[in-house]
Image (cartoon, rainbow, N blue to C red):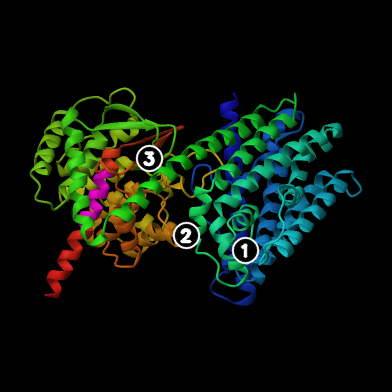
Amino acid sequence: MEASLDREILAEGAAIHRGIREWRAQWAAELQQFDGSSEGSDGLQPTPCSRRFPSPLHAYYPFLFHTCFPEIPVETVRDLALADRLYTEHLLTYDRTLDGQKPIEAVALFGAQMEHMQCLKRVYELFPLGHSFWECFYDGYFQTWKSVRDEKLCHTHRIGPYSFRRFCALAKGKTAVLRSFTLALAFLTNRTEELPRLSAALDRHHIALVLIDDLEDWRQDFERFNFTYPLTRLLQMEGLTQEVSSGSPPSPEQVGRLLYTTGLMEQQIRRAEFFFRKSNEAVGSLPLPLWRDFNKGFEERCRALRHDLAEIRRREEVRSRMRASHHRSNRIADSIRSGIRFLTASHSREDVFRAFRSPHTYMCPSKSLAPSRSITTLIFRSLRSVQEPDPGLMSLLDSTSDWLSKARATPVPPGLPARLERAFDPLPTDPEALSGLDSAFAPGHGPLADGLYWANFLYSCSLQGFRPPKLYTYVLDCIVREDYNPWSFGVSFGPISPVWTKYATRPLLPLLLFCLSLGNRVPREAIQNLLLGPYRTTGSWNNTTETALSLICLLLTEYEGPEIMQAVARLSDSQESDGAWAPNAIYREGKTYYGSKELTTAWCVEALSRYHGSIAHAKGTNR
């Protein structure tokens, strides 16, 4: 029952989020008619909302507490959740404007005021003027805007005293008004004696969220001189305050490296984990199973993040040693050969390529599974494109091709992710049969359950010289509109998705198949925008596997920007002593991640080989 209720809550949140986006689009259209403009303001543009559970957090908090107040009708809880999200949107617009994240836009501020009005309209229908609820609401309102002001005045463009107690007060204060919409449940049932426990639970939860949010946004905060608690601590601890004050601040790369290596990031995550746990303790014996599970999910994610941080530090040490021990001019060809030697040695031990699973996105530790058709197919395709006269590579390709031929009719072995394996099942070669499969393609709302199958289907059709009209048109339309949600897979429920784990749902593998399938017909700029997004936002590539896939796709679309060299350097620096590259997950099913060191290595070899080939071609052309 609880699992199904969780899904209902998430669906409610998604509906609320879509509704708000539709309102914003309507308001924008009305303003366009009023001022005669042909284009809407960015501040009121609707955003794509086709992911399965796209709702931000404050679209369903009242639902999580409903089990403690079951006598309240669901329709009333829905109104409170909607009011919660409306006020959150209103608050975020003003907060971002004050932070200088975007220029002041009259239309965006008007939209925020409309959200404020819509929020209060719904709440006034539940609580008439003079009700004790309004004392609680306006107290939270005062705390929120006072904290927003204090943070802006004291910690923007200045580095001053910033104790953890002050951080907690500001974090609790900034979100104080938002707790009102959940506390309203106690007012509606005249159970105001529960307010202290509910308030404490929400405050501790919000403190934990701000701790995580400051880690996610550290780079943007640093570049805007918004000195959050972790940035202030780091700059003071490392003696960098004078450099910042003198106008010669350290580079974001240096700050990021210090955050990872000094232990501050891990300490921040531990504190968040502590407050999620304290949030559950605050509610005592109240019947709030969904709220407890919600916080426990956050705790699990925090533990996983700490584990990933340890692996990130290990990989950074490898990169540092590699940078110190080689000259890049000699390294690309050596890296390709070393990668091929690793793959040849790995394959010769068992004559198969296996999939691996892990509870962590960085695949450490990982458990070996059965031989995998999907992993082997992808490795075979990748190595087939490598232009390296290596006898070991030729032998490896021959034996891999033989294994795939024998495995054509075998069922999916136990333990492997069935959807991933079936996506690479052999397909018919007859055009009539392929056309029949294409006619059965029926995209729905949100991510395609078999998106990877259809991406591979398009690739397989391209090898046969057949263009499936229905799928082909749909894929091109998705790329042109930059709507990749249908091709995202392994979408997770969980509000912590920091920059170094977001690749788990990024559709890079389908994009690779699209680039290989469409050739010169691929909408290059649209795909390049998606691939370069993480680099342009954070100034670095998320991880080795994503870097390799992005580099292959960029080279296939003939991109020649400076990011290419940065990606090549990242791969060259990340190769380990045995010739392999440490893996990251390529697929997620439930709470389990799947990947393979051999597959990541094959993609890195392919990426460097394609780059090496493009350099050689350019030199030949210049001659």
For marks 3 and 2, the one nearer the N-term is: 2
Residue at screen point 54% across, 72% down:
39
**Mark 2: few/some/many CA within 10 Å (<14, 14-19, 20+):** few
Above-or-below relation of 429 to 513: above
**Mark 1: few/some/many CA within 10 Å (<14, 14-19, 20+):** some
> Element at badge 2?
helix
> Element at badge 1?
helix
Residue at screen point 72% across, 25% down:
287
The residue furthest right is 130
Q: Which numbered dot is residue 585? A: 3
Residue type, numbered disc 2: Glu
What residue sits right under mark 1 in the picture? 241
Q: Quadrant of residue 115?
A: bottom right
**Mark 3: few/some/many CA within 10 Å (<14, 14-19, 20+):** many
Above-or-below relation of 511 to 279: below
Residue 154 percent coordinates (x, y): 73, 62
The N terminus - image quarter = top right
Q: Which residues are magenta?
A: 601-610
What residue sits right under mark 2 in the picture? 253
Residue at screen point 9% across, 50% down:
389
Q: Decide whether residue 609 is among the magenta residues.
A: yes
Q: Decide whether residue 591 is among the magenta residues.
A: no
> Element at badge 3?
loop
In terms of depth relative to the viewer, which is nearer, 219 or 522? 219
Residue 605 percent coordinates (x, y): 23, 49
Q: Which numbered dot is residue 109? A: none
In terms of depth relative to the viewer, which is nearer, 185 or 333? 333
For marks 2 and 1, the one nearer the N-term is: 1
The residue furthest bottom is 36
Residue 345 percent coordinates (x, y): 18, 36
Looking at the image, residue 361 sits to the left or right of residue 601; the answer is right
For the stretch drawn in magenta, the main secondary structure is helix
